Amino acid sequence: MVATDIDARIETFDPEDPVFALHRGGKMEISASVPLRDAHDLSLAYTPGVARVCEAIHADPEVAHEYTWVSNTVAVITDGTAVLGLGDIGPAASMPVMEGKAVLFKQFGGVDAIPVALDTTDVDEIVETIIRLAPTFGGVNLEDISSPRCFEIERRLKDALDIPVFHDDQHGTAVVVLAALINALRLTDRDMEDIKVVISGAGAAGVAITQILRESGVRKVSVLDRAGVIHSGRTDLNSVKQLLADQTSGWAKPGTVDDALRGADVLIGVSGGTIAESAVAGMAEDAIVFALANPTPEVHPDVASRHARVVATGRSDFANQINNVLVFPGIFRGALDVRATAISESMKIAAAHAIADLVGDDLAESYVIPSPFDPRVATAVARAVTDTARREGLARRPY
């Protein structure tokens, strides 16, 4: 969204608007989990009793995971450079989104989350700041950090920290896309190894989706940016897009989105651009279209449905909502439960299969992914994550 659009919305600001009324004072608060009724309670929760716990942690830092909030608390960290639907609006303006994310963590996963908006866009400063904050938290959820900086920030933090680091814009989207695709392929009787996939958008989500699909057996992938298909013959690629070109070199050919979609089985839109109906019309029979840009999908669902058998969006007012809330609460719930040192690709794939399995025999064109309000989701994802973490040797809590 460009600045003029934001300015236009500001002009319509109305304190009585129910949206603003709900956000007044923020959407979260800190509350005590122990009683403070009298001097005795105070002596246990604070001085002098608290000193004994501090001394125990000093002697064995692992004790902190049992006797502080660390074991159930995640930092939701942004620099405000890529806020959904708004773009680079800065740290202060990003805070309502970060608060919302924290509330979702609590509501759907029982995970306490603290929003942290950093007043810097420098990669070194962001990495150093998070490393210094890390002892306060059991995990780090990176949010709304622009590409390609987000890739380096996540990589460096994963190398430096022994707690889960997860960039939800990348991996949350990728996991739920894979879950929906598993069921869409089951419905249309296709196999991962045979399908032709076009991914429109080479930002954080597009890169992660490409990676998880390849790890799941997909071989025929074309990724597009504004200049067309990303391929090894282009000379305008940054390091991230060059890696995409290398990974898809066995299939991707130069061309436009119309060229790439001709005969394709699957379109995944994570670009925010617009794809013409004529391009979608050229896809294979029983096509699958995930148009995930918000609030305006790359292809309107009504248009896509004329040419595709399965259609999904990122919106709640159409069937098959691809929503990250299906993923991140359960991912962190499971990782925290076993004190995982990282969130691996196998853990993400296991989470996707757990989500897909919940649809079961109710599978239909309008139901390839469960609702974000399905109470089974976070538990199923957490169980898949814990089982995989233990199997891979990433769990510090073996039971």
Image: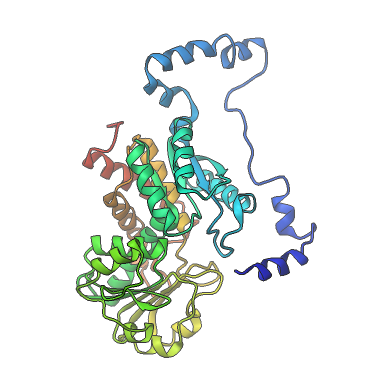
State whether residue 212 is above or below residue 65: below
Q: Residue 311, percent across and down?
A: 42, 76
Q: Of residues 111 and 124, which is closer to you in this image? A: 124
Left or right: where does residue 265 sit relative to residue 71?
left
Does 21 appear above or below 41? below
Q: Residue at x 67, y 70 (%)?
A: 5
Q: Give residue 265's position: percent from left, percent from top.
A: 30, 79
Residue at point 31% right, 65% down?
A: 210
* Horizontal side of residue 195 vs 274, given as left or right: left
Which quadrant of the structure image shows residue 214? bottom left
Q: Is residue 148 visible?
A: yes
* 383 or 23, nearer to the observer: 23
Does 293 sit above or below residue 376? below
Where in the figure is residue 208, as x and y percent of width and height? 35, 60
Which quadrant, please, contains the N terminus?
A: bottom right
Query: Residue at the location (41% across, 48% down)?
Result: 153
- Judge from the rendering whether residue 25 lies leftward or rightward of residue 64; answer left or right: right
Question: What colour scheme does the image use?
Answer: rainbow
Q: In this rendering, does residue 376 appear at all?
A: no
Image quadrant where residue 316 sits: bottom right
Say if 34 sits above or below 145 in the image: above
Hey, which residue is sitting farthest front in the picture? 235
How many numbered marks are there? 0
Depth check: give the residue in front, 276 or 368. 276
User: x and y percent of residue 130 in the render?
Assistant: 47, 39
Report the quarter where the C terminus lies.
top left
